Image: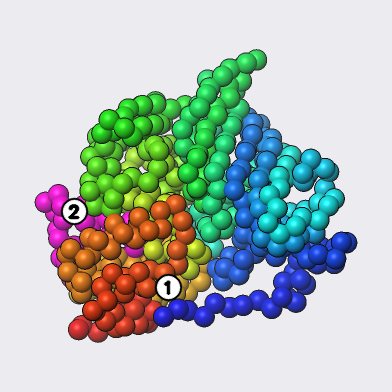
């Protein structure tokens, strides 16, 4: 079963992407602005596929000034005379493509670039964008805050679902993953934590540059930068996996005990979900109030705006497998990320002397709306709109879908599905139809129609079987 996706007629896209279409200077089309995500129609762009971002940033918390240089390596997926990047706020000083200055203009979050020469389908090209300004905090349709967030001693850059365009230009949709080099220069005395591994740290003329590298594919919404004063812990888990954890000193005492569980949770995750998908792990615990959420599953190391509890830590680390490695293709598929991470919390409890997942499921089914008032307000695979993407029907009912599958296929097949799904789509993207097809393939003798139609796509609380 799949949900009909609203299609925008090509002519309408042209009307929206006026600059890209009328340009037609060389007779080849412009890449589309947006990729038809019904929840964020302008997020992401068509016509190319990014393979690498090299971001060189400089930030001064005192003046709140950011300067940036983004070198974006991409492959054209069609002939292009123009293409869009997403960038919100900031001032663009110069754009070059293949080393030549390109014309560009900006409409809302669309930075439309017209290279001097046409780009041919299949060609790999480099775009360099020089930009600067005061990066914005974005308020989401649901009221939560993302983008560039100022903290007491620095800043946090968080990108779910569309915040990354506040600090670098790019193809800001979950389906376009790339490797990253992120270098950030800050006043000496401050630290910078990002995704991947720290390659170098050097100080000159009162400023320190931190160079981070992410070799494994990463969606832009889980890219992060954390700037401030941190207590840093570096260790190795199970003799092979580097952990880098940064904690705001004011949150150290409150988070010490729970963060000490990262190795144990990671090893449990490997037993339950399969090999850890990235080359390092860790966490960032900062001080940022009123974001409207308790954490973000930034790749390699989740960010917590305050000290997490164990359930939240388990949830975020599980996202490394489900969300960061296997990434939902569009925001409509976000239950594949949140449902799995929530189910991971249930499994953790079950495996550590707490409630069984069955008991958690039963309690939710019987009176879940007492705790989660909107639990039955929409089906997990069809969030009503962008303001409700991160709500209980996606998290709790999404986990209930997984439990229904477990009930139907039994323990061994369920474990094989959970691990196999992470292995098959490792470092990739997947949508709900991919998942239902995968489950059906793993249990060919079972009929899942009722689970899909009632639990995944059905309105209201499904009837008791
Ligand atoms: N995805 C996060 C989690 O569950 C929560 C979150 C991060 C969020 N950013 C958000 C929820 C923006 C709503 C809006 O771990
Ligand atoms: Zn989550």
| 1 vs 2, front mark | 1
| Residue 309 makes an appearance in the image | no
Q: Residue at the location (57% across, 36% down)? A: 182
Main SS of the magenta part reads helix
* Distance from Cα at disc 1 to Cα at disc 2: 29 Å
Does 342 appear above or below 446?
above
Q: Residue at the location (85% across, 66% down)? A: 27
Is 190 magenta? The answer is: no
Task: Please identify the quarter of the rendering in which residue 411 is found.
Answer: bottom left
Locate ligand 1 by image quadrant.
bottom left
Q: Position of residue 225 (x, y in %)?
A: 52, 38
The residue range painted magenta reads: 338-363
User: Where is mark 1, residue-wise?
Assistant: 433
Q: Residue at the location (46% across, 41% down)? A: 288
Q: Position of residue 379 (x, y in %)?
A: 38, 76
Name of the residue lying farthest toward the right: 25
| Residue 306 makes an appearance in the image | yes
**Image quadrant occupied by the N terminus:** bottom left
Q: Residue at the location (11% across, 51% down)? A: 353
User: Where is mark 2, residue-wise?
Assistant: 349
Dot 2 falls on a residue whose secondary structure is helix
């Amino acid at each position: 079963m799949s949900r009909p996706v609203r299609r925008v007629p090509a002519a309408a896209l042209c009307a929206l992407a006026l600059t890209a279409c009328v340009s037609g200077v060389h007779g080849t089309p412009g890449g589309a602005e947006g990729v038809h995500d019904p929840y964020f129609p302008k997020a992401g762009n068509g016509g190319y596929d990014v393979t690498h971002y090299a971001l060189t940033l400089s930030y001064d918390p005192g003046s709140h000034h950011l300067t940036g240089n983004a070198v974006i390596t991409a492959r054209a997926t069609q002939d292009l005379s123009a293409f869009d990047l997403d960038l919100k706020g900031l001032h663009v000083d110069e754009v070059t493509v293949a080393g030549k200055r390109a014309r560009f203009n900006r409409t809302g979050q669309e930075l439309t670039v017209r290279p001097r020469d046409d780009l041919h389908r299949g060609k790999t090209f480099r775009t360099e964008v020089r930009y600067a300004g005061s990066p914005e905090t974005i308020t989401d349709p649901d009221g939560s805050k993302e983008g560039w967030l100022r903290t007491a001693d620095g800043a946090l850059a968080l990108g779910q679902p569309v915040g990354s365009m506040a600090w670098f230009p790019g193809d800001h949709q979950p389906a376009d993953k790339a490797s990253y080099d992120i270098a950030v220069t800050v006043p000496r005395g401050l630290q910078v934590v990002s995704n991947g591994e720290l390659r170098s740290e050097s100080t000159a003329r009162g400023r320190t540059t931190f160079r981070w590298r992410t070799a494994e594919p990463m969606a832009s919404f889980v890219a992060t930068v954390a700037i401030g004063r941190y207590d840093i812990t570096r260790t190795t888990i199970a003799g092979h996996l580097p952990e880098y954890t940064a904690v705001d000193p004011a949150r150290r005492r409150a988070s010490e005990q729970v963060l000490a569980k990262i190795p144990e949770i990671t090893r449990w995750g490997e037993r339950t979900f399969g090999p850890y998908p990235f080359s390092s792990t860790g966490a960032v615990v900062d001080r940022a109030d009123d974001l409207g959420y308790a954490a973000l599953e930034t790749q390699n190391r989740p960010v917590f705006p305050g000290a997490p509890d164990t359930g939240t830590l388990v949830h975020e680390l599980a996202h490394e497998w489900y969300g960061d490695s296997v990434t939902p293709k569009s925001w409509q598929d976000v239950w594949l990320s949140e449902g799995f991470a929530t189910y991971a919390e249930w499994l953790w409890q079950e495996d550590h002397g707490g409630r069984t997942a069955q008991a958690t499921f039963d309690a939710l089914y019987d009176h879940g709306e007492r705790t989660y008032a909107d639990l039955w307000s929409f089906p997990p695979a069809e969030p009503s709109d962008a303001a409700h993407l991160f709500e209980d029907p996606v998290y709790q009912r999404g986990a209930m879908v997984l439990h229904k599958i477990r009930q139907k296929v039994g323990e061994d097949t369920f474990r094989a599905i959970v691990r196999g799904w992470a292995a098959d789509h490792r470092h990739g993207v997947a949508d709900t139809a991919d998942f239902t097809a995968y489950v059906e393939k793993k249990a060919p003798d079972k009929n899942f129609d009722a689970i899909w139609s009632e639990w995944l796509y059905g309105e209201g609380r499904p009837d008791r079987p």
